[in-house]
Image (cartoon, rainbow, N blue to C red):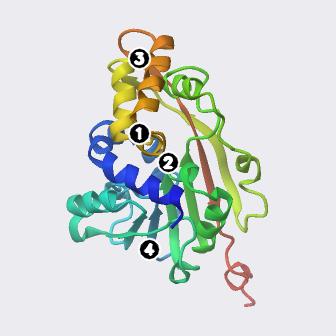
Amino acid sequence: MTDRLSRIARGWDQAADGYVAYFVPRFAPWVAAAVEALETLPDGPILVPCCGTFPEAELLLERFPGRELAGIDLSAGMVERARERLGQRVTVVQGDANILDARWSRACAAVVSAFGLQQLPEPEAAIRSWTDALRPGGRLSVVYWPENTEDDGPFAAVAKAIGERSDYSWEDRLLDGLDAVVERDEFVAYPMTHPDAATYFDTSNHGGSMRALALARGDDYIAQLRQRYLEQAPAGEWTHHPRARLIVVRKPPSRAAAAPPTS
């Protein structure tokens, strides 16, 4: 595991409880959109890479009763909480979801992932690996935070305070050469409300994706970042409408299944 991936995993281990309490309910509309985008599926299991605490599980179990359901996540802390909540109803394993191992190749009826893709070191390779896991006729539904998530709001304010642009050049190439039919590629936005600017920042630091940044740069950096962020933030309750990108692709049916009957 690279240093970066190790730091991300440790960050989510530390953030797991805060994430469950604060961000899981706020991200729920996007998770539901990813699950609802799955239409008719072939037989087979449903795989959820970057499952975190697995908020997709209940929705998938309700919509596709009787299906085998499996999740993969790099963070041992996230996996532990998912197992505690879901018990034997699903399988949750700790592992790198960027490139799936061979046992998932052409095995899955569907692959669903919410807000993991943008954290991976090779998003283009990941989405190809996830598509390769599909059976003919299977569907991949991915929702992730793109580079242009919002023009204002706390996400944008933190990015402005950091003042460094992450490399999102992979977004333009994400669907190039994908062995699947793109059924949807659109932005979906929902309102999200925070009690105030400080609550959002502090929860992101201790219960969100900022934890990995704190591990990399230290508490002094985070304190300075917090000050810069609050200087531009409004007072009081803060509602914004962040945009996530939703992508749904379908694996073409096999030639044998697609061929018309001969008699």
Q: Which residue has dot 3 on it?
A: 238
Furthest residue in direction top, as rendered: 235
Q: Secondary structure at mark 4?
A: loop
Q: Quadrant of residue 145?
A: top right
Residue 80 at x, y = what percent? 27, 62
Q: Where on the picture, by quarter, is residue 120?
A: bottom right
Residue 36 disc label: none
Q: Is residue 38 visible?
A: no
**What type is the residue that disc 2 sits on?**
Phe
Q: Secondary structure at mark 1?
A: helix
Q: Earlier in the sequence, mark 1 or mark 4?
A: 1
Residue 203, image x, y percentages: 34, 33
Q: What SS does tag 3 mark?
A: strand
Q: Amino acid at mark 1?
A: Phe
User: Which residue does the numbered mark 2 point to in the structure image?
Assistant: 115
The secondary element bearing badge 2 is classed as: loop
Q: Which residue is mark 1?
A: 27
Q: Do labels 1 and 4 touch, CB within 8 Å?
A: no
Q: Which mark is residue 45?
A: 4
